[in-house]
Image (spheres, rainbow, N blue to C red):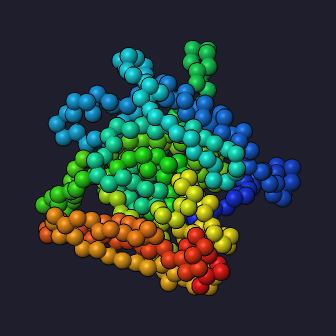
Amino acid sequence: MSRNVFLLPLVAILFALVFSCDPDDDGVIIVPPRERDEEAVPATLMIENYLETHFYNYEQFTNPPINFDYKIVFDTIAGDNANKTPLIDQVLSKNVEDIFQDGVIYKLYYLKVKQGEGERINFSDKTTLNYVGTSLREREILVNEDYETVYPTEVFDSSVSPISFDLTRVVKGFQAALIEFNGATGFTENSDGTLTFEDFGVGAVFMQSGLGYYNTPPVGSGIEFYDQLIFSFQTFAVEKTDQDLDTILSEFEDLNGNGNELDDDTDNDGFPNFNDPDDDGDGKLTRFEVEANQYLLNPGDPDPELADNEVEMQRKTNTETGVVTIYTVVFLDADNDGIPDYLDENTY
């Protein structure tokens, strides 16, 4: 089943409230959300405890059995699996800022099984992948008169076949993990119409609720308030995007280079530059304040010499002819003040 429930609208509900009935009153009481900085601490601890007590099928990746599907499977370290290597010894981590509250930083854990040998994934790319989404909770259960902590998980979404996502529209934790991977090098089409990808990436991410849905899970998803989330995935195709069709690829609209596309808003109109066709708000669309060029290179041709204010956006290769097309943008600066026209409200 594929419900795509982990998509995140660009205009998020920043101050979402949880409503519940008051048993002493027929009215409705408002329960404010938990403080995000305080919730981050137990959320991270829960994930770390899970990583310490669980493992993945790493032996199958080391020595793949016949018809192995290269999908990650998690299990508890216990019984016959008591000597397995815990995930905590195999994961990587990175710091990711909360996009809703300044000063809150999460330690995001991710598992890199296969890097992928194709194109690197960028925060704004349209990426084709397979995935399994799982919610993670912590419960105390009574076992032989003693309480034990367990970590029940529940699959809430998965893809049956590869599906494409605009990474500016998924939850932050998923986006932040995917940019650490590459896509596949290519694919072959099978007789039944399916595709077999080559040298693709394989990994997983373990994210705190603050990097997922927090207290606003999608209705009907099965995700509870403040659930931590786990996504395992296989990364296939990577496509560059220009969400606002202003000629500048979205990855180049992260002006401060911090990987957060939402905090670059030159004209402060509430629309980040990557989703704003008039970045400086001067009434002249960005695509008319820059110059787009294309260069065709036959096999063996040297790269063109670009102007100082010209930036390569991307290049595409015709696999049949070997001809390479290079797409560039010239950032015009009519008044020579060092500010490109498309970011200069005084030049239009």
Q: Quadrant of the N terminus?
A: bottom left
Q: Is residue 72 above or below residue 77?
A: below
Image check: 187 left or right of 38? Answer: left
Where does the image place residue 99, in percent across and percent down from the top left?
63, 53
Q: Quadrant of the C terminus?
A: bottom right
Name the residue rendered at 55%, 73% in the picture.
340
Image check: 193 left or right of 6? Answer: left
Q: How many marks?
A: 0
Q: Is residue 258 above or below residue 50?
A: below
Where does the image place residue 181, in percent across and percent down from the top left?
38, 47
Q: Quadrant of residue 148?
A: top right
Q: Is residue 98 above or below residue 150?
A: below
Where does the image place residue 262, in percent across and percent down from the top left?
59, 61
Residue 246 appears in view: no
Q: Is residue 233 above or below residue 93?
A: below
Query: Closest to the observer: 148 or 199?
Result: 199
Name the residue rendered at 56%, 41% in the picture.
95
